[in-house]
């Protein structure tokens, strides 16, 4: 039996001087795009994936909370997550039923949005209507219904909830990432441990002809894909392109509770913006900082006081059993934050025609990676979307400064 290539054993130099596709970044999106493309029977070219840190120690993929939801306000994002859920549930089938590949479980405890005022309740009603039109299982819940279904909540200030236990919850994104990467390499995509530091454009300025690696090697290319996560702007500038994507800190806390809840805690979005959920035998909570600026790409400094001063009081108020808890772990990750509209940016640039984006996911990246990896691959191979029309997410809106607004951003 062939064994998958061992992670962390990447060569540092490319095997060829020219590639049909060079992907800058080998984390979740670089691996997704490469896997979808290399397994497409209509593609017979070469793919090079350049990853600056194959340990993935600080990349957004490693620091994700690995959840998926359909409770969005735009049809595009709802459809993207619906396919994501289908892909997760049928992961082994998508991997050609390879006996080495495990099944992925989608633990559908759902998201619970809580509204404590009439204005947000109206927003939940409007988004609920859109979700129902798309076939999502979202249900609106009164204060009394929430209290009956989840008696551990304090709902004295709540006027409405929005909940969906159909294909919403936690999944093992790390395993999907690992097998995309492994299978892409087995099928012929070439991953190297290096870094793209510059790009050469042709005389017209409309095509990237070469990428330069940190080692000094220059590689010819027909198409370039920016899959650089929070570093997307750095990569875009190599082609003379400005991109409204910046790294922003997001904090995650794992804690244990003295008093058991007796049932799973849905991924609860408190009106304060703090979210919490069941995490195995423990619980997870997350939040942005009160002051939320762009940070340096290597800034992962924790802010210990944020749990005591901001998070814990909200947890204890919403779930009184969380008055007695013990913090067991915490980490800081980066959102690749799209400052225009907090939505994904995909497709080719409007002027540099062979430069493709798969950027700006603003915290939605892991759950959207099956659909957007597939969509980007379709653009690369066919020059058009085939499975889902994701035109609203294309780069054109960035060039025109026309936001595609998503109301349900966590």
Image: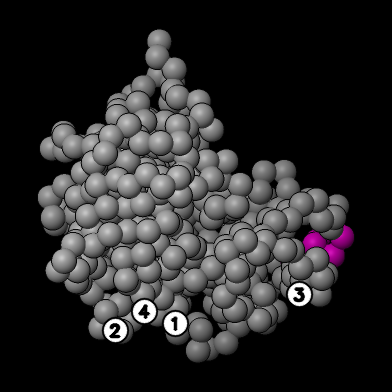
Kindly give the residue lying farthest to the front in the view shown: 216
Query: Would residue 334 be visible to someone looking at this image?
Result: yes
Q: Position of residue 121 (x, y in %)?
A: 50, 82
Q: CA distance from mark 3 to mark 1?
A: 25 Å
Q: Nearer the viewer, residue 144 or 158?
A: 158
Chain part drawn in magenta: 319-324
Residue at figure coordinates x 60%, y 68% from the top left: 296
* Residue at image point 45% right, 24% down: 5
Name the residue carrying label 3. Answer: 310
Q: Is residue 154 above or below residue 252?
A: below
Which badge, 3 or 1, is on the more N-terminal residue?
A: 1
Q: What residue did someone put label 2 on?
A: 402
Q: Quadrant of residue 34?
A: top left
**Left or right, 58 with reference to 347:** right
* N-terminal label among 2 and 3: 3
166 drawn magenta: no
Q: Quadrant of the N terminus?
A: top left
- Image side of residue 298 versus residue 371, left or right: right
Q: Reading the chain from its start, which is encountered first: label 1 or label 2?
A: 1
């Amino acid at each position: 039996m062939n064994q998958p290539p061992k992670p962390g054993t990447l060569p540092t130099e490319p095997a060829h001087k020219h590639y049909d596709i060079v992907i800058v970044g080998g984390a979740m999106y670089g691996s997704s795009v490469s896997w979808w493309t290399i397994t497409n029977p209509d593609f017979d070219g070469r793919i090079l994936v350049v990853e600056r840190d194959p340990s993935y120690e600080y990349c957004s993929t490693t620091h994700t909370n690995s959840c998926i939801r359909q409770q969005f306000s735009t049809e595009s994002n709802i459809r993207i997550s619906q396919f994501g859920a289908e892909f997760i549930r049928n992961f082994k089938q998508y991997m050609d039923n390879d006996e080495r590949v495990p099944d992925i479980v989608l633990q559908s405890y759902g998201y619970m949005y809580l509204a404590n005022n009439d204005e947000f309740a109206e927003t939940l009603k409007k988004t609920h209507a859109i979700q129902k039109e798309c076939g999502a299982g979202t249900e609106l819940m009164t204060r009394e219904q929430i209290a009956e279904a989840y008696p551990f909540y304090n709902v004295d200030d709540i006027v409405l909830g929005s909940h969906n236990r159909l294909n919403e919850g936690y999944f093992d994104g790390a395993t999907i990432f690992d097998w995309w990467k492994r299978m892409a390499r087995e099928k012929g995509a070439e991953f190297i441990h290096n870094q793209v530091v510059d790009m050469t454009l042709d005389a017209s300025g409309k095509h990237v002809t070469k990428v330069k690696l940190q080692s000094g090697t220059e590689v010819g290319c027909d198409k370039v894909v920016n899959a650089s996560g929070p570093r997307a702007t750095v990569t875009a500038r190599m082609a003379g392109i400005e991109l409204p994507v910046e790294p922003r800190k997001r904090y995650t806390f794992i804690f244990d509770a003295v008093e058991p809840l007796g049932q799973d805690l849905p991924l609860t979005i408190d009106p304060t913006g703090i979210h919490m959920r069941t995490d195995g035998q423990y619980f997870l909570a997350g939040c942005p900082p009160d002051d939320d600026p762009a940070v340096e790409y290597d800034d992962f400094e924790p802010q210990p006081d944020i749990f005591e001063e901001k998070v814990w009081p909200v947890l204890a108020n919403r779930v009184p059993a969380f008055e007695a808890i013990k913090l067991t772990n915490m980490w800081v990750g980066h959102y690749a934050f799209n400052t225009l509209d907090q939505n994904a940016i995909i497709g080719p640039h409007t002027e540099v025609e062979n430069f493709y984006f798969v950027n700006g996911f603003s915290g939605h990246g892991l759950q959207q990676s099956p659909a957007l990896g597939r969509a980007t691959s379709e653009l690369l191979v066919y020059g058009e979307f085939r499975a889902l029309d994701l035109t609203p997410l294309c780069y054109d809106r960035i060039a025109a400064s026309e936001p595609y607004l998503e109301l349900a951003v966590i």
